[in-house]
Amino acid sequence: MGILVMLMVVVMMGCTRTSLTARPASGPGTPVPKDVAVVAKAAIPAHRLTQGEVRYIRHCAGCHGADARGGGAIGKALEVQPRNLRSADLLRNSDDELVVRILHGKSLPVLVNPKALPASEEEVSAILAHMRRLPTLSWGQVEAGESVYDSLCLTCHGIYGRGDGSLVSTLPAPPRDLSTPPYQQQVSDDDLLKLISEGKGAMPGSGDVLSLDDRKAVVTFVRMLSPGYELYDRYCVGCHGTRGKAPDPALLDVLGFPSSQKMPPAFDRAYFQSHTDEQLRPKITHMVKLNRVAMPHFAGELTAEQVREVVRYLRTLSPES
């Protein structure tokens, strides 16, 4: 997969996204609970997050914690404790200075517990299955659905649909894990659209606040949720991007990577037509077993304005000495 993959990825995006907790069993024999997410008597009012809060949760909370104090679940497994982003010292910097620091980061090698990395045949198979889906996905629909999901569903269902959102502790029953293969196989697109539109139990319907196109886009995004999507998002997206595109050489030059380094490939149809599963599995295994990473750079993944939204969100939190 190239030296660049070894240098940039593995847990780079994992350390910015979510916890290292193990997934629950999700094989073919796993029983699907009956509506565990929707047995409450009173509906949960919809809570629309700001874009800055959403981007913070997706990209920063895993290391810096939901409260931005540096106590994220992944951060606790790192050699260097992530910084308290509510520090009055830090927030004295101007918005422009903070945007530059977040976009281009700081070289900070950290050590991650290798036991937390995916290594089983099942996990490698899950990553491979998701990779092979990348060229087939309708990305306009996926991204539109992710935006709506983030604003209305993320606080209960979590980033990866596992039912581990920030409001879970306030719910009478845990939300359903939307990402397990048994659930994905048993529910149809029409079923999902009806649930999103009408709600069920404690889950409020969104038919009165979302257009039909928006609700269909959420269905498309939910269909992408899977163990493979979660693992790819943690360990591969830093170099290969969400869509599996080859990185922009100009961006890598800005971030200081020598042009002599081999660029990671684009995961397009031609790539998968020329590579068998037997050829790809060792590459995936090698990549995820590396355990030295660096503080991520967000240039190329987030725009300056999107980072500015995160900064605005951080400024809404109470500063601390």
Image (cartoon, helix red, strand yellow):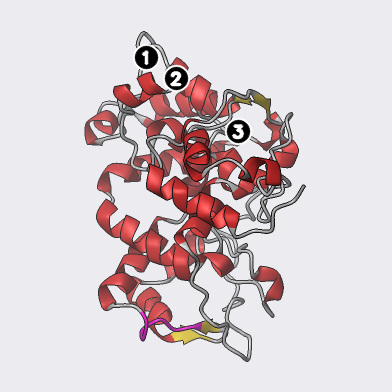
Where does label 1 land, which residue? 262
Q: Are marks 2 and 3 in contact (CB under 8 Å)?
A: no
Where does label 3 land, which residue? 119
Which of these two is toward me, 51 or 122? 51
Where does label 2 land, which residue? 4
Q: Does 264 appear in magenta? A: no
Visible residue check, residue 308: yes
Residue 307, how many percent across, how many down? 46, 46
- Occupied quadrant, residue 264: top left
* Amino acid type assigned to the residue bearing label 2 in the image: Leu
Q: Residue furthest left?
A: 270
With 153 as the anchor, is 262 left or right in this view?
left
Q: What's the CA distance linking mark 3 and mark 1?
A: 24 Å
Q: Secondary structure at mark 3?
A: loop
Instruction: Give me the residue at 39% from left, 42% from top.
Output: 304
Q: Secondary structure at mark 1?
A: loop
> Crowding near pointer 1: few (<14 within 10 Å), some, many (20+)?
few
Lower position in the chain sequence, tag 3 or tag 1: 3
Residue 52, how many percent across, how many down? 49, 56
Instruction: State the quadrant of the N terminus.
Output: top left
Which residues, given as a range, are shown in magenta?
A: 204-209
Q: What's the CA distance linking mark 2 and mark 3?
A: 20 Å
Residue 5, how many percent across, how many down? 46, 23
Lower position in the chain sequence, tag 2 or tag 3: 2
Which of these two is toward me, 153 or 228? 153
* Amino acid type assigned to the residue bearing label 1 in the image: Lys
Lower position in the chain sequence, tag 1 or tag 2: 2
